[in-house]
Image: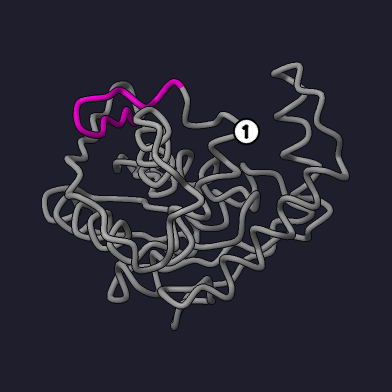
Amino acid sequence: MIITIDGPAGSGKSTVAKMLSKKLGFVHFNSGSIFRAVTVYLKHIDFDFASLTDDSPIKKLNIEAEFKKGEMFVRVNGLDCTPNLRDNEISLLTPTVSTNKHIRSMIDNFQRKFAKTNNLVIDGRDIGSHVFPNADVKFYLDCSLEERARRRFNEEKQKNSKITLDEIKSQIRARDKIDRHKKYAPLVVPEGAKRINSSHMTAEEVCNKMFDMING
């Protein structure tokens, strides 16, 4: 069974997907972590991100995902990328990487292959619309820009980051623009998706609502 959760940056997709997968006994697959892992790897080999376009050729990447106690660990060409997935620099570079159609094709194929042998709750920005358009259940999780920025700011504060709320809001606004206007698999509400606005809901409340919708 495949359950997809799409939505913009900072809407709480990954947090809710992790909770829901645990409640259902499914694997939580975070597609964004795969894109971030590829970004970590490219940075590791001193790739020139400024030269990357939608059509830039990329050599085949060996992507591996391993799950331990509900956590996903990702390696690209043997490099463990997991420790750096949430670095702010990686967050800023990943949108550029995600627009490359060759990288997206590799990651899409990896996800589809993994789904053949696992029950998944998988979150991302084009999961229910492009990667798994025939998923068993599809959700679209929305949230106001202000609330998304506040949540991300609180996360960054825990890392003693000096970034400001206004800077985070600006970053998310820019990411939204990229995601919604990509030539290849832009962010949209997937056909048939159950839409939930989490602006005034806790992650637990969203998870419980999704669980009831699945079993209702």
Q: Residue at x 25, y 34 (%)?
A: 76
* Looking at the image, residue 69 lies above or below residue 129: above
Q: Residue furthest bottom?
A: 191
Judged from the image, the secondary structure of the residue bearing numbered disc 1 is helix
Q: Residue at x 32, y 75 (%)?
A: 133
Residues 43 and 88: in front is 43
Provide the residue span drawn in magenta: 72-83
Quarter of the figure with residue 68: top left
From the viewer's perspective, is 55 left or right of 96? left
Quadrant of the drawing holding the N terminus: bottom left
* Looking at the image, residue 127 lies above or below residue 165: below
| Mark 1 crowd level (few <14, some 14–19, many ≥20, 10 Å Cα) | few
Total marks shown come to 1
Q: What x and y, as percent, mark residue 96?
A: 50, 55
Residues 53 and 202: in front is 53
Residues 75 and 207: in front is 75
Magenta region includes residue 212? no
Q: What x and y, as percent, mark residue 95?
A: 53, 54
From the viewer's perspective, is 167 left or right of 173? right
User: What colouring style does the render use?
Assistant: one colour
Q: Residue at x 39, y 25 (%)?
A: 82
Disc 1: which residue: 88
* Looking at the image, residue 55 lies above or below residue 157: below
From the viewer's perspective, is 1 left or right of 165? left
Q: What x and y, as percent, mark residue 77?
A: 20, 32
Q: Residue at x 39, y 64 (%)?
A: 127
The amino acid on which the numbered mark 1 sits, given as a three-letter code, is: Asn
Quarter of the figure with residue 24: top left
Quadrant of the drawing holding the C terminus: bottom left
Q: What x and y, as percent, mark residue 143?
A: 71, 60
From the viewer's perspective, is 28 left or right of 177? left
